[in-house]
């Protein structure tokens, strides 16, 4: 079955920060899990390079929008690589193929009678690249996200007849209750639709950095129409000489932050309807990573540098922390102190130490060979249905809940070590069979949780599975008892070594 997952494309007006890493890692976790199922996966990320935010940033830096885009697109591509993302394509909206595809689709929308020329007047936020309604403003005329004062702008634009899609959108939401998740975001989007939709600007006439409107080159397309279409256009040229739209469209899930909900949950499906294209199956909207109760944002200056975190602790530690600390879909606070606590207590002590102890005991008591045996009924019951529960959580895009399911069994295995005390059994020749059972159960349980953890901590999981002598990471193998014992273990340096606080400061 085809599974198409996307991140939003990221503005190149500033360098990447932890919020960008968060979204990319979440989409990668989904993609990796689905590949474990044997699904036909396509994972897209990239950069949004047109529009006023980029043009203004370039002007402040004394460079051109193209030069700024080229410089920062590399940084976002590097971020994807450094967080170990397995994206199948990295789209740039300055790609010639994307520009041509945008012009083709929006010309189709224009020919369908969904576009007209008019004059727009409204409160415009250059950082959001968005006109704000009176109801969205705070403190008079300030942007609710960037807190800057907005100017009342007036210009000739082409308009998209969004209001004409009010009933089709309400019907879409009624027939597909899981179109937007979590439920509070579904309710928020539906409430926005029900308050009455107005036609919106399709073009800008006071800006040159954008995709030219083919029927009137005095205008460029409003950046959001250009950007939203990336999910579709990428499939037309991601693989040279091959059009992947028939194979992967519509998208299975678009992953995004809540500040772009309106564009994706209202404008995007309406645009697709106007172009006579299928709407995506699901939008999953995650919350903000907060520091000191503020959204992490380059423009606000409150960011954690993901590159520094990865350099000190490793990529898997960052991936794990972001998926574990904040329930995916909700706002949540992050901090260096919280990261260090998760790293030490969970990754190093609970998981890393479990791996080290298990391998060491198999090496010491059974000459490095995992004994064949039957696991105790209590553990079999605890592990029963784990793979199905994890599948269900991933189907719901509940990646934190999936990780919680797995981690309960990591802790159960640690408790099992303490309860059974294999180091005591090893002193009693009459307990040899019991020791075989315990060592098999530990190795098998460790194998199962590691297969399931692979999407979250891929490099560490691969190293541990190799040391256990069973590197099959397919989800069908993530069942307790699928391993038979009799494998020879290898050496494994600490998965999550201690990092000195002085070095991390």
Image (cartoon, rainbow, N blue to C red):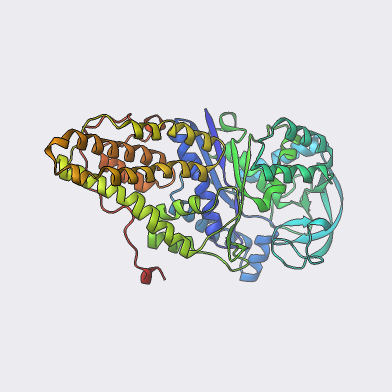
- Can you tell which quarter of the image residue 494 is in? bottom left
User: Does any portion of residue 267 appear in the rendered image?
Assistant: no
Residue 379 position in % (x across, y down): 35, 35
Q: Looking at this view, is 9 or 398 the one in front?
A: 398
Is 269 rendered above or below residue 154?
above
Q: Is residue 442 visible?
A: yes
Q: Is residue 173 left or right of residue 362?
A: right
In the image, residue 120 sits, relative to residue 401, either above or below, namely below
**Total labels drawn:** 0
Location of residue 318 in the rendering, given as x and y in whole percent from the top left corner: 44, 55
Task: Tell me: 135 left or right of 383.
Answer: right
x then y, percent, for residue 243: 57, 32
Q: Quadrant of residue 349?
A: bottom left
Q: Residue at x 69, y 34 (%)?
A: 177
* Residue 196 percent across, percent down from the top left: 84, 44
In front of the other: 167 or 363? 363
Quadrant of the rendering where the C terminus is positioned: bottom left
Is 137 on the left-hand or right-hand side of 338?
right
Residue projecting furthest to the left: 429
At 38% from the left and 33% from the top, the residue drawn is 478
Which residue is nearer to you in this view: 95 or 436?
436
């Amino acid at each position: 079955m085809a599974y198409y997952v996307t991140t939003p494309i990221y503005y190149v007006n500033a360098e990447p920060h932890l919020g960008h890493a968060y979204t990319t890692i979440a989409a990668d976790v989904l993609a990796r899990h689905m590949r474990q199922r044997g699904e036909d996966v396509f994972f897209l990320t990239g950069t949004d390079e047109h529009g006023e935010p980029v043009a203004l940033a370039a002007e402040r830096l004394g460079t051109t929008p193209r030069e700024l885009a080229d410089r920062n697109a590399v940084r976002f591509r590097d971020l994807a690589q450094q967080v170990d993302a397995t994206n199948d394509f990295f789209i740039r909206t300055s790609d010639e193929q994307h520009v041509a595809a945008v012009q083709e689709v929006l010309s189709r929308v224009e020919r369908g009678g969904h576009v007209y020329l008019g004059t727009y007047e409204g409160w415009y936020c250059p950082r959001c690249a968005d006109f704000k309604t009176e109801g969205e403003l705070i403190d008079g005329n300030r942007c609710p996200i960037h807190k800057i004062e907005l100017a009342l702008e007036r210009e000739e634009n082409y308009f998209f007849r969004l209001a004409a899609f009010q009933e089709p959108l309400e019907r879409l939401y009624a027939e597909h209750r899981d179109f937007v998740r979590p439920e509070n975001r579904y309710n928020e989007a539906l409430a926005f639709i029900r308050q009455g939709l107005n036609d919106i600007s399709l073009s800008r006439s006071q800006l040159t950095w954008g995709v030219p409107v083919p029927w009137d080159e005095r205008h460029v397309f409003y950046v959001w129409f250009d950007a939203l279409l990336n999910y579709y256009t990428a499939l037309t040229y991601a693989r040279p000489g091959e059009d992947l739209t028939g194979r992967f469209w519509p998208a299975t899930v678009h992953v995004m932050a809540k500040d772009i909900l309106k564009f994706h949950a209202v404008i995007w499906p309406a645009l697709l309807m106007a172009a006579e294209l299928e709407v995506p199956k699901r939008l999953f909207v995650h919350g903000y990573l907060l520091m000191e109760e503020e959204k992490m944002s380059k423009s606000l200056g409150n960011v954690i540098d993901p590159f520094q975190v990865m350099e000190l602790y490793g990529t898997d530690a960052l991936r794990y922390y972001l998926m574990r600390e904040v329930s995916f879909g909700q706002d949540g606070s992050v901090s260096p102190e919280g990261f260090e606590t998760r790293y030490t207590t969970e990754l190093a002590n609970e998981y890393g130490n479990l791996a080290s102890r298990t391998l060491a005991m198999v090496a010491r008591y059974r000459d490095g060979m995992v004994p064949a045996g039957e696991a105790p009924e209590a553990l079999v019951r605890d592990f029963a249905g784990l793979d199905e529960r994890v599948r269900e959580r991933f189907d719901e895009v509940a990646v934190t809940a999936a990780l919680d399911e797995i981690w309960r069994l990591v802790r159960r295995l640690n408790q099992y070590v303490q309860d059974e005390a294999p180091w005591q059994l090893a002193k009693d020749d009459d307990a040899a069979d019991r020791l075989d059972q315990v060592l098999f159960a530990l190795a098998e349980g460790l194998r199962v949780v590691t297969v399931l953890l692979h999407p979250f901590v891929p490099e560490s999981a691969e190293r541990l599975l190799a040391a256990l002598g069973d590197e099959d990471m397919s989800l069908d193998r993530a069942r307790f008892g699928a391993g038979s014992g009799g494998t020879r273990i290898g050496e494994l340096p600490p998965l999550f070594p201690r990092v000195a606080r002085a070095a991390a400061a």
